[in-house]
Amino acid sequence: MGGNFYKLSMNDVPLRGKTVLVRADYNVPLTKDGEVDDDYRIRMSVPTIQRLLDQGCRIVVVSHLGRPDGKKDERYTLEPAAKRLAELLKQPVRFIDDCVGHKVYMAVKRAPKSSVTVLENLRFYPGEEANDMEFARQLAKQTRADYFVQDGFGVVHRAHASTSAITAFLPSVAGLLLEREYMTITSAMKRPKRPLVAVMGGAKVSDKIGVIERMVDVADGIVLGGALANTMLAHNGARMGKSKIEPGQDEVIERIYAKARHKLGTTNYDTLLLLPDDLGVGTSLEPSATRRDVGARAVGNDDYALDIGPQATTHMLAVIETAATVIWNGTLGMCEIPAFRAASEALAATLAEGRATSIIGGGDTADFVLHWDKQAGKSFTHVSTGGGASLELMSGLTLPGIECLLPGKK
Ligand code: ADP
Ligand code: 3PG
Ligand code: MG
């Protein structure tokens, strides 16, 4: 992969026999009955925890789950995640139903070497999202930690008490997952094997559209799908019926086109940005919705554009087949409805069979490819545990939860 990580990691500090506070991102989807629905983030944290167990550490794991807004809310308890972690580690994991206070202090004090204690959801306290120094001080003190290991890659784009303020109280280093995510994503972006193609879709238009702007500099081709494409098509004058679009994006879209013109000249610029020439539309959002394929300029007033069409898929795959690196964030269609998975399935299949380096990020996109892939994600080069974090990193931003870790040795 080349290059060294610019922060200290677990291998650089003497952790043997120490009490270690680990920040994980166990913000996982739960079923209606409160069971863990997708354990990818928990599984990916196991190597770090196992390494610490092998070194005789007392491990205290903290995380958030959902957005309970600073109040205790049993729907967002981390107990199911602790249960799943115990199954994966094949050893008992103690769950404490608070993350600060005397109960936590006593539990860690009594914990034996090579043990794992998971604390309750950090976001049950307002101090977490407020990046509150006093809350972070309590976390450090009551968990009796000697070191802090940041391994919650998915949350390091947030400056919260457990990703930022905590590092004022404990020597703080990167965990194995964080380091691997950072190195894989940044090396794909800094020294990409070319052509580099970015596929961007999904629903969070305003979060992602800024990334397209940066991708114009970085990528040799950009394929657009999902509500992101709907929004760009609407900007270009297409009627989109009832489709999901986000208004108010005109300025950034104009900047994207201006940058593309600057890069490729006024006659060729639209070869850089591949918008769908046809769309799969439905007349409802029910799971049983059926599909019609229409030209991108022929969406009816009652239609929802829910996938890119077969012609657009053929064009996309032709671009993908020439690529040496593919970055994919955001499903190309509404994959929750079977009829609108076609383009995302075709892309997944082409990436799985092809030789291009494939880096897939985003909560829903990762969930989709992991369920699609019979090899649970191994068919791709890297399936990131980060959504917003991987996107921000790909777009060249520094992430506050990484910046504040101890600097690496040169
Ligand atoms: P990720 O979580 O991978 O970062 P997003 O959350 O931005 O991606 O987008 C994924 C969501 O986008 C999925 O729930 C999917 O249903 C939705 N989506 C994709 N295409 C469309 C579309 N054409 N119209 C409405 N929703 C869409
Ligand atoms: C994520 O799922 O992207 C992370 O866990 C961060 O969650 P948040 O968007 O609620 O801060
Ligand atoms: Mg999502």
Image: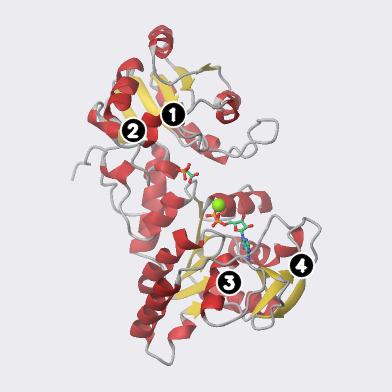
Q: Can you give x and y, in whole percent of width and height, for residue 132 in the image?
A: 30, 31
Q: State yes or no: Cβ of the residue under disc 3 lies below 8 Å from any atom of ligand 1.
A: yes
Label 1 amino acid? Leu
Residue placed under numbered mark 2 in the picture: 161
Q: Can you give x and y, in whole percent of width and height, for residue 214 in the image?
A: 37, 68
Q: First in sequence: mark 3 or mark 1? A: 1
Q: Residue at x 52, y 74 (%)?
A: 232
Near-viewer residue (359 or 128): 128
Vertically, is 93 above or below 175? above
Q: Which mark is residue 122?
A: 1
**Crowding at mark 2 (Cα within 10 Å: few <14, some 14-19, many 20+):** many
Q: What is the C-alpha distance between the residues marked 1 and 2? A: 9 Å
The residue furthest left is: 410
Label 4 amino acid? Thr
Near-viewer residue (394 or 234): 234
Image marks 2 and 3: residues in contact by CB distance under 8 Å: no
Residue placed under numbered mark 4 in the picture: 283
Q: First in sequence: mark 1 or mark 2? A: 1
**Crowding at mark 1 (Cα within 10 Å: few <14, some 14-19, many 20+):** many
Q: Residue at x 59, y 75 (%)?
A: 316
Label 2 amino acid? Ala
Q: Can you tell which quarter of the image residue 303 is in?
A: bottom right
Q: What is the C-alpha distance between the residues marked 2 and 3? A: 37 Å
Give left or right: position of 291 versus 242. right
Image marks 1 and 2: residues in contact by CB distance under 8 Å: yes
Vertically, is 294 above or below 398? below
Q: Secondary structure at mark 3?
A: helix
Q: Secondary structure at mark 2?
A: loop
Q: First in sequence: mark 2 or mark 4? A: 2
Q: Can you give x and y, in whole percent of width and height, for residue 77 in the image?
A: 55, 27
Q: What is the C-alpha distance between the residues marked 3 and 1? A: 37 Å
